[in-house]
Image (cartoon, helix red, strand yellow):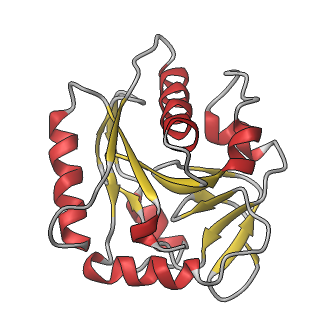
């Protein structure tokens, strides 16, 4: 399994054409030329976290069930790859050393404790951040039990899934206006102070 072999789906609110163009530029920064991706329309809901969760679940369902794939690489349109041209090589190296049993592999998150698995992956129990992850069929079977009671990432954190994050993050979020929280976000300074990030 490597970067090129995994079907990629990107969640983008239709009115956020700026984010769509930003995402395309971001992909060009890690790989010149076209990278095949499926765009999934984001969903607006009175409770933003519900719309976000619905969009993620629909995106995964499209790739795994309608396209018949084993796993999906899911990205939000504000994903940022600080490592630029080094990113894909790093992802592929990590994918050579994935745990034997996993449900979700994350490229970068906000989390508490990291439990070292190997030089490439850490096991985590709680996290927030769904801007870049890979989910397989076993993981999606568990995600389908989501009850919309809270944010999807918070819910996942309480479900005893096999969650792993890269030891050196390949992906963070762009700072900017978030439709989810309704204001400008600036998370990266916190991430850079706490975690190893590919640059």
Residue at image position (62%, 32%) is 151
Horizontal side of residue 79 vs 20, given as left or right: right
Which quadrant, please, contains the N terminus?
bottom right
Q: Nearer the viewer, residue 177 or 56?
A: 56
Q: Which percent across, then down, holds residue 166?
A: 58, 73
Q: Is residue 86 above or below residue 146?
A: below
Count of numbered marks? 0
Q: Quadrant of residue 87?
A: bottom left
Residue farthest toward the bottom in the current orientation of the protein: 119
Residue farthest toward the top in the current orientation of the protein: 46
Q: Is residue 26 above or below residue 93?
A: above
Q: Quadrant of residue 80?
A: bottom left
Which quadrant, please, contains the C terminus?
bottom left
Horizontal side of residue 85 vs 79, given as left or right: left
Residue at image position (67%, 21%) is 148
Residue at image position (73%, 22%) is 147
Q: Quadrant of residue 27?
A: bottom left
Q: Which percent across, then down, holds residue 76?
A: 39, 45
Q: Nearer the viewer, residue 136 or 53?
A: 136
């Amino acid at each position: 399994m490597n970067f090129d072999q995994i079907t990629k789906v990107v969640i983008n609110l239709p009115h956020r054409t700026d984010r769509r163009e930003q995402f395309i530029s971001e992909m060009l920064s890690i790989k010149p030329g076209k990278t095949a991706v499926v765009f999934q329309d984001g969903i607006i809901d009175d409770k933003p976290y519900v719309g976000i969760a619905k969009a993620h679940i629909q995106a995964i369902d499209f790739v795994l069930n309608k396209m018949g794939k084993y796993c999906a690489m899911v990205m939000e349109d504000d994903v940022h790859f600080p490592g630029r041209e080094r990113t894909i090589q790093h992802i592929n190296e990590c994918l050579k050393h994935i745990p034997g049993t996993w449900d979700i592999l994350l490229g970068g998150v906000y989390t508490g404790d990291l439990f070292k698995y190997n030089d490439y992956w850490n096991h985590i129990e709680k996290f927030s951040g769904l801007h870049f992850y890979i989910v397989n069929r076993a993981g999606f079977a568990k995600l389908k039990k989501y009850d919309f009671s809270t944010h999807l990432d918070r819910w996942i954190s309480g479900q005893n899934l096999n969650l792993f994050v890269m030891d050196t993050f390949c992906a963070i979020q762009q700072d900017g206006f978030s439709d989810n929280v309704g204001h400008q976000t600036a998370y990266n300074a916190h991430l850079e102070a706490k975690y190893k990030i590919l640059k």
